[in-house]
Image (cartoon, rainbow, N blue to C red):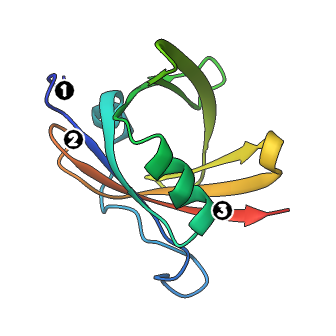
Amino acid sequence: MKGIWSLLLLFTFDGILDGERGFVPQENFDLDRFLGKWYEVAVVSDCPHYMQNKQRNAVIVALDLKPSAEGNVTVMAAAPRNGSCKQTSIQYALTDIAGQFFYHVSRLNVDVDAYVVRTDYDHSAVMALIALRM
C-alpha cells in the first residue's frame, strides 16, 4: 500500500517514441501493485496551451486509481480550485499491453494513450501520455 509520500511524475511527450508502438511500458508491470493513491507533482508537455494552463493552476493533484466494474481503471483526480476541491473522473481502458491504457477526452475530442514507463510502485512513477486529436 502506498503511503502519504507517494507521488506521480507525469510527463507528456509526443516525440520520444519506440517505432510504431509508442512508449514501452515498464517490463513486468503489475497493475494491482500500481493501483491506489498517487500525487501528480510535475508535468511537462510540448503543447504551449497545456503548459500555460498548468502554470496558471500550479497545484499538486491527488489521484486515486481503482479497478472499475467493467474491468478497467477509474482515476479520480482532486485538486484545489477557487477555494474548493474540484474532482474529476477518468476511465482508463486496459489494453492488451500491461502498463498501457487508453482514454478519450470528449470536450477536447482527443484520444490518449497512457503508458507507465517506470515505477517502483511505492514512491514514484513516470507516465507518458500521447494525445491524438480526432
Viewer-nearest residue: 106 or 115: 106
45 shown above or below 125: below
Viewer-nearest residue: 130 or 50: 50
CA–CA distance in space, label 1 to label 2: 8 Å
Residue identifier under label 1: 2
Q: Quadrant of the N terminus?
A: top left
Q: Are marks 1 and 2 in contact (CB under 8 Å)?
A: yes
* Residue 24 relative to residue 37: left or right: right
Local secondary structure at mark 1: loop
Q: Amino acid at mark 2?
A: Tyr
Viewer-nearest residue: 113 or 15: 15
* Residue 99 relative to residue 38: left or right: right
75 shown above or below 19: above
Q: Are marks 1 and 3 in contact (CB under 8 Å)?
A: no
Residue 117 image offset from top left, x and y in percent: 35, 62
Q: Residue at x 59, y 32 (%)?
A: 72
How many residues crowd around disc 3 within 10 Å: few (fewer than 14), some, or many (20 or more)?
A: some
Q: Amino acid at mark 1?
A: Lys
CA–CA distance in space, label 3 to label 2: 25 Å
Residue identifier under label 2: 121
Q: Amino acid at mark 3?
A: Ala
Q: Nearer the viewer, mark 3 or mark 2?
A: 3
Q: Residue at x 51, y 59 (%)?
A: 51
Local secondary structure at mark 2: loop
Residue identifier under label 3: 131
Local secondary structure at mark 3: strand
Q: Residue at x 74, y 44 (%)?
A: 105
